[in-house]
Amino acid sequence: MPSERPTSSEKADQRLIQGPLGLEVLRFGTPIALGMGLQTLFNLVDAYVIGRLEPSVAGPALGAIGICDQLTALGTIVSYGLTVATTALLSRRHGAGDRQGVEQVAWQSLFIVLGLSIVFGVAGLLGAGTLVHDVIGAKGKVATLGTSYLRVMMGGSFSIYLLLHLTSVARALGSSKTPVALLIGANVLNLVLAVLMVYGPGNAPAVFAWGPPLARALGIPRLELLGAAWATLIARLVTLGPAVWLLVARFGLFRWSARPAPDRAMLRRIAELGWPSSTQLVVRISAMLLVHSLVARTFTTETDQSATTALGIVFRLETMAFFVGLGWGSAAQTFVGVNLGANNPGRAKRAGYFAATYNAVMMGLLALFYLRHGAELVGWFDHEPGVVRTALTYFRWVGLSYLGLGIGIVLGAAMQGAGATRRVLILDTSVVLLIQLPASLLVTLQPGARFESLCVVVACTYVAFALVHAASYRRGKFLETVVR
């Protein structure tokens, strides 16, 4: 009797475990990395929409979204840390052929992400003003606009938590292209909605001239920065439907009739494995918030907030480097987890090196692009000379250190894929607490503080991330971690 032909999912599994490693990592990781980068690119276009408003609104609004991006990222990162734990558990069980284990982890991880969504949503609705005014120290119109924007973004944060979680589950099971297509589609929809809701029936740049007539016909008012927040939330909600359908139709997960009751033991296992990843990523975002706070307190005034605006722009551009790194890191996690599940630790470790190398190439190209075209990029959002000058200073000192940032992210993710989440947390926390925090305070609290000195500290921190993760990864102790 002839054997059944393997399904597309089974073919993908075979490539992960047996295919030419360098080629398979490249094939699997490239669409994820590009998709994550393109997602940020659409967010930059969203910032461009805001930047075309009246100057009295555009400058403060850009500064506000720069701050709020980092604040909303805290919750997203905590949720993503639990997702990292989930993908480690899923890929290991998937590699071992444990179908029942895959279904159990998928359902229990969904319960815990939903619970986290409620916590951060309530915190955003009730505490947005405190976060923007008191924690960050934002001033003037930046603080006023940021509070309203943050309330919508954090209140609806469940949408991004679920979207990233569900697409990551699909990647852990061997699907790389469809989840990326969903994320890109969400951001295309976000752009269309942003044009309609930011400008409404009012004035808009020529390139978006189609927006006001359509907004007028649909009765959509001009919401400016707040419109960008609502556009993002709606786009994510719309995309959740196809994401759920993918997992139900292709992988047979999340069938309502098969839903289990919450399993305390499994919930605790996911939390135990995930909290170090969540905390580690929070440490990284907190380090960026530290820079934002020091810049707001040291280099701005009530009437001159150009430094905050510049940092809001460059951090949005830098987020592309961060997300591309997360894309290659996701690929590394999948290869490490699946190959460890298939009892092939040597192949698992080499996959991390391949992913880090590919990411380093992309980081180098991105850094060179920013260095060469930084003035045009920043001017695309804000032409004010002080903003452009400050942003270019940042790129000049920090740009090439993106290679270190990327290597650290990918090798850390590879170790997390083996379940060594606490090791990565210790490494990142050590760099931030022993290098970035004291050095940042030293250069900003002294008389005559210079923005360039703070940039040097950021660059040294990114290089340190690469060095400590590479040293730890080379030792290979993380392969001794058992994920069950």
Image (cartoon, rainbow, N blue to C red):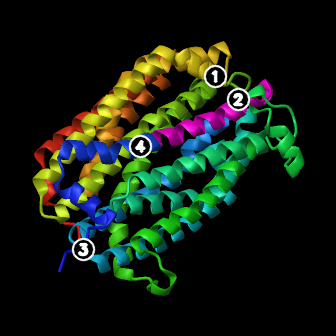
Q: Nearer the viewer, mark 2 or mark 4?
A: 2
Circle 1 or circle 4, nearest the eye:
1
Q: Is residue 40 magenta?
A: yes
Residues at circles 1 and 2 in contact by the CB criterion of under 8 Å: yes
Q: CA distance from mark 1 to mark 3?
A: 56 Å
Which region of the structure is painted magenta?
Answer: 36-63
Q: Residue at x 70, y 21 (%)?
A: 304
Q: CA distance from mark 4 to mark 3?
A: 48 Å
- Amino acid type at circle 3 is Glu
> Is 315 left, or right, of 147 in this rendering?
left
Q: CA distance from mark 2 to mark 4?
A: 27 Å
Marks 1 and 4, how far apart in space? Answer: 28 Å
Q: Which mark is residue 4?
A: 3
Q: From the image, state whether disc 1 or disc 3 is nearer to you.
A: 3
On screen, residue 3 above or below 70:
below
* Residue 427, position as x, y percentages in the image: 27, 45
The numbered mark, 1 or 3, whose residue comes first in the sequence reads 3
**Residue placed under numbered mark 4 in the picture:** 284
Give the label on residue 380, or none: 1
**Which residue matches tag 2?**
51
